[in-house]
Image: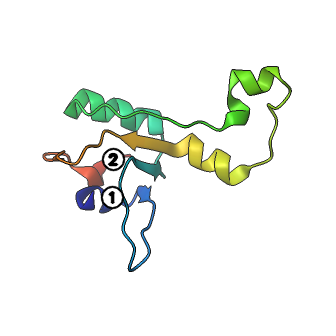
Amino acid sequence: MNALADSPKLVFQTVPEGCEHVYHLMAARYDGHSRDDLMALLYEEFNLKCIVQYWPLYRSELFRNHGFGAALVPETDRYYDSMISFPWWSGILYRGIAFRHWD
């Protein structure tokens, strides 16, 4: 994760001093031009399949169908619309990816 953290366009959750993170997921906010373009580039150039997950419930078909499809949550929308989840497991090695050159 340290290599990914050097990218100025990726914003990861910060871990407060004296605390640890279990890194169940490796999600970040992408502050670049297009998250979908970044995901396509990572897959095409590096065979790194990233996904978008955990969408806001009010955007789901089930919630919309039951009248809960509207919400005024700008920070949730901003995060979700730029969220990218990287494949992650404890032994993964990210090598050969020029993380600073996206966008």
Residue projecting furthest to the bottom: 18
Above or below, comparing residue 42 to residue 28 in the picture:
above
Say which mark, if any, is on residue 78.
none
Could you give the CA–CA distance between mark 2 and mark 1, rounded to whole angstroms? 8 Å
Residue designated by label 1: 7
Residue designated by label 2: 102
Please report the residue visible at 38 percent of the width from the left and 79 percent of the height from the top: 18
Report whether 84 appears left or right of 67.
Answer: left
Residue projecting furthest to the right: 67
Type of the residue with mark 1: Ser
- How far across and down, in percent of the image, does residue 50 sit? 36, 34
Comparing labels 2 and 1, the label whose residue is closer to the camera: 1
4 or 27: nearer the viewer: 27
Please report the residue visible at 38 percent of the width from the left and 62 percent of the height from the top: 21
Type of the residue with mark 2: Trp
- How far across and down, in percent of the image, does residue 16 sit? 44, 75
Above or below, comparing residue 15 to residue 3 in the picture:
below
57 or 5: nearer the viewer: 57
- How far across and down, in percent of the image, does residue 99 sit? 26, 51
* Number of residues whose C-alpha sits closer than 10 Å to that of mark 1, classed few (under 14), some (14–19) or many (20 or more): some
Confirm or deny contact between disc 2 and disc 1 (CB under 8 A). Answer: yes
Please report the residue visible at 31 percent of the width from the left and 38 percent of the height from the top: 87
SS label for mark 1:
loop
- How far across and down, in percent of the image, does residue 33 sit? 48, 44
